[in-house]
Amino acid sequence: MKVLIVDDEPLVRRSLGRACKTAGHEVYEAGDGREGLELWTKVSPDLVFLDVLMPGLTGPQVLEALPTEVRKATKIIMMSAFSGQHNMQSALQMGADLFISKPFEDIFTVVKMAEGLMNK
Amino acid sequence: MNGIQKNFQKEFSKRTTQVLERPLVLLHDDEDTLFRLIQEIFSQDVYFRQVELRKYEAGLNPALVVIRARHVQDAASLMHTLRAKNPLTEYIVIGSQWSLSQMMELVNGYKIHRLLAFPINQERLKEAIKSALVGYEYSFSRSLLHKEATTQNKNLEVLNANLEKIVEDRTLHIQASKEEEEQRLNQLRHMIRFIKDLALISSIDELLLLVRKELRKFSKIGEPLILFQTHKEWSEVYSYQSGSVFHSRLRQKFSLSESVNLHDIDLTREMANAIGRPIARMTTIPIETQLMKRVGYSESQVRLCIETSMRDEESRSLIEFLQVRLQAIAVTVDRLLLENELVNYSYRWEKTFDGLRDPISIIDHQYNVLRANRKFSDKIIQEKCYQVFAHRESPCEGCELQQSLLERKSWTYQIINGQKTYEVHSYPIQFQSDGQATNVINQYVDITEAREIYIRLLQSEKMGALGLLAGNIAHELNNPLTGLRSLAQVLIAQEKARPQLQSDLQEIEKAAARSQEIIKNLMEFSKGGAGELVTTTLDEVVNRTMPMLKSVIRRHRYQINLNAQAARIKVFPAMLQQVVFNLINNACQAMMETGNLFIETNVDREKSAVYLTVQDSGPGIPMEIQSKIFEPFFTTKKEGQGTGLGLSFSRDVVRNMGGEIRVESTPGHGAKFIVEIPIAGGK
């Protein structure tokens, strides 16, 4: 499975990427929204971890800019540290499949949730 | 007569002329011999008469009587009659052949000194007549002198009498003028007493009584009254009625004459209408109030009115009497009106100041209260402002009175008086343009509430800003922390073969987790809202909080007694947790070295409340700051170690849940904070 991680925090990308690779997935990383959008259309990932607040394009802006068929072909997990502003409901409305608030309690649980989503 | 005079002047002295005015009388005997003889002796024009002796007229008063008597008895009886009638008359008696004894009788008995014998020797007769006439002249002039003397004496007596009369008159006059003088003196004394009395009176009432007393000596006059027209719309009348002074204010103005008016007909009528009774006749006397006119009452008119039944001429003495007193009365009225005006002014000012919302005082440079309104102090005592206002023995904290005096301009500062905070505006009073200001008007504006509101606003703004900041920090930190922790977790999973590294990684993971917890707390704290009211127990809140305090509590010996498990409380758990955290954290920080911490919860069913007690063994809290520790931004911690909001926030939280927080501390013996939370649903 191809996994794209769009997050401006390198440690998040690295840890999440390491965990996904350990689980046997192909991992792509993007440091901001614009890069993420490019990579997304280029590699057509099965699953995308999308941070909400990023420089350049924000997570929701990336989703908007994405062609509908591309977006629909991908499982999307939205992540945010601002739990108050975004939640599962708003994330679903924007076209995401799952919302995970940061910080994670356990990275492997997150990976498991992602795998569960992809296997649906 | 003139002829006689001329003849005799030759022979007699001048004085004799008077003698010759007297007739010579010749008394004859039965012959004419003597008559002829005498005729021969004297010239024809000598006046003499031959008179019948018996027919002798008493009124003739002759100078000389010549008697020819045959018998001594004849001569004697004749002499007897004549002597009595004419005491001055000289006599010549011509006898015949009388014996010596007969002649002796004549001489001794009838004082006949000229006796001639018949027949007459002409020479001797002439001598005798001459000597007799001289004798007569002598005694006549003596009698004249005597008469003159008598007259003179009488005149003198009259003169004397007149003089005496004059002296008497003078004496009377002097006496009269002395009395007059005394009377004038009395009048003066009376005037002086009147003026003295005037100086002592302190009201128009008293003035009226005094004037009334003064006028008592006049009959035919009624009670005096004093009429004031100092106001635009009304007149004031002071009258004496049935034993006391009656003051009435009439909503009308009278037309008054400017000079003394013996019969003020207009006023009599108007006044009668105004006071509702007939008035016989009113005499009005203007009282000139110079001072009042100078201070802005140019229209003011004052009249002394006297009801009288006197005739005009009788009135004059009354007017005279009053006119000498008028100036003194006018000065007194002036004084009374001015005093009254002053009292009114100061009364109005006093009321104005008392009516103000803020306390106001006038204070000198040594903090003595000179004047103050009621808001400042109910009592008027000579005390220092801080004694009266703040009940202190030294100037209030924050007082900048001296700066105001020094800078000579208005100065604003804040003082704290008990529970209240005042903003003081000091306005220095400078009496001279270049002089030093020694007095200050202080206006005290109570800003306690405003300040509290301001501080709360500030606090909430700060909290808002802090919240925003915390949110941003949390976001910024959460990302790397998430990565850090996740990476550590991944590495732990991958490096199972290297236990040393794994253990290190686990420490990193734990630290990251703790950091995340702190951030979470910070965010919850800063969000303010705190979520929803939850029914829980105080013990549970304390239990949930304790793990977060592990690191700070480690250093100390501590004991936890939780006895409030049974009482349920309705609180914002996160907020109350923060309070517990703050109190225990503070207690730990207060104890420099290893100390004793005692934490206890209790239930008081009586008061329907649960209590949390946090007691430390630190240095305690100085008395002077015990009241301040709950104020926002008050901190004793070093900069960066505390915001000064902990206890203020805690108190707000606890009060918000219907509870209270308080401190008990004796410096040197630690501090005890007690939190009271009401039990849910009352008892």
Image (spheres, rainbow, N blue to C red):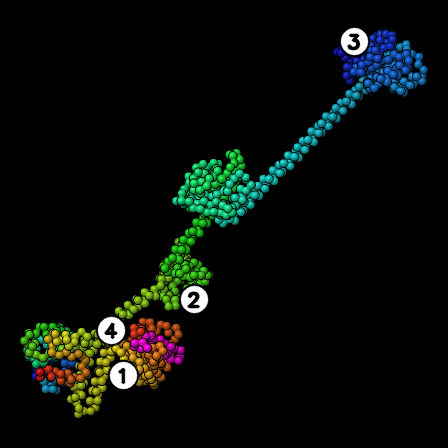
Mark-to-mark CA distance, 1 and 3: 192 Å
Tell me which amino acid carries mark 4: Gly
Q: Which residue in the protein does label 1 denote?
A: B547
Sequence order check, earlier mark of 2 and 1: 2
Q: Say whether residue A6 is visible.
A: no
Say what amino acid the circle numbered 2 marks: His
Disc 2 designates what residue? B391
Mark 2, other Cα within 10 Å: few <14 / some 14–19 / many ≥20 = some
Q: Which residue is mark 3?
A: B45
| Residue B241 vertical position relative to residue B173 in the rendered view, above or below | below
Chain under disc 4: B
Q: Estimate the x, y position of residue B410 in percent, counting from the top left.
A: 36, 59
Q: Nearer the viewer, mark 4 or mark 3?
A: 4
Vertical relation: B60 (above or below) B361? above
Q: Do the residues indicated by labels 1 and 3 lie within the same chain of the protein?
A: yes
Are there few (<14), some (14-19), or many (20+) residues within 10 Å of tag 1?
few
